[in-house]
Image (cartoon, rainbow, N blue to C red):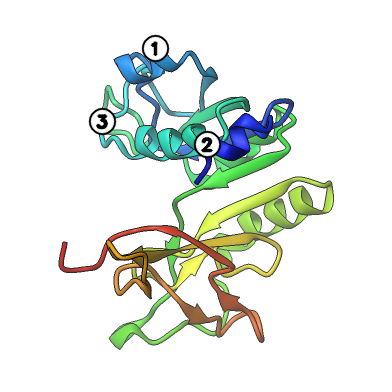
Amino acid sequence: NVAPIHRRGGTGAGVTVAMIDSGFAFGHQYFQRMDYNTTVVLAPGASDKDRDGSGHGTAESANLLAIAPGVNFVGIKLDNESSSSNGATILEGLQEALTHNPDVISVSMGFDLAGPNRTHLTALPNSLVALEAEIQAAVASGITVVFSAGNGHVAFPGMMPEVVSAGGVYVAEDGAMLASDYASGFMSAIYSGRQVPDLSGLVGMAEN
């Protein structure tokens, strides 16, 4: 349903979106043909701007650019393609994203805060406190921060009250919508009263 919005001029022009992900293979003919306004930046420890070994970031960016083809897109690559290094962390990617003065930061990644037997953790691990603080500061400065609700995960930072948490809905051929059994939906045990997600995009069901 996005074509009528595009015809009315709603393309995202003038908005800078920083997406933090595995990588962005913008040499693919699809991106070349569409001529989007894209830049790829390496987070600390990442490598090979033109590659995306897992394909995750490339696919996520295609989703975003199909909806908002006029944005100024800055891809922050986390993965290291050329060595056994783990590349960059989400925190490092976020810190790099902030240097590009984004209006929106979009991240389809996160941490699963579930303990034994999938019980929800009730306190944020110390290792994630710095990431929480950076996100809170970014939102306080006026940046819209979007994180995924998770694929069955008890997702952080997706559960933070400050972020827009994106989940998934399954849409059948007849248009009927069902909550996906693949995407996450939960009440946070860390942030009281926080229900995840805030909104949903299209996803599949677990069986496929």
Residue at the image position 53 percent from the left and 22 percent from the top? 41
Q: For mark 2, give the secondary structure.
A: helix
The amino acid type of the residue labelled 1 equals: Gln
Task: Check the image and report above or below for 154 versus 74.
Answer: below
Q: CA distance from mark 3 to mark 2?
A: 31 Å
Q: In this rendering, is residue 18 above or below 40?
A: below
Mark identifier at residue 3: 2
User: Which residue is under mark 1?
Assistant: 32
Q: Which mark is residue 53?
A: 3
Q: Is residue 43 visible?
A: no
Q: Nearer the viewer, residue 8 or 147?
A: 8
Q: Where 44 falls versus 169 (above or below)? A: above
Q: Position of residue 194 (x, y in %)?
A: 63, 79
Is residue 105 visible from the viewing direction of this image?
A: yes
Q: Image point 63% across, 34% down: which residue?
A: 17
Q: In the rendered view of the protein, which quadrant contains the C terminus?
A: bottom left
Q: Is residue 163 left or right of residue 86?
A: right
Callout 3 crowding tier (Cα within 10 Å): few <14, some 14–19, many ≥20: some
On screen, residue 54 versus residue 11, left or right, reads left
Q: Give the mark nearer the N terminus: 3 vs 1.
A: 1
Q: Give the farthest residue toward the right.
A: 141
Instruction: Give left or right: position of 145 versus 3.
Output: right
Earlier along the polypeptide chain: callout 3 or callout 2? 2
Q: Callout 1 environment at 10 Å: few (<14), some (14 to 19), or many (20+)? A: few
Q: Are marks 3 and 2 in contact (CB under 8 Å)?
A: no
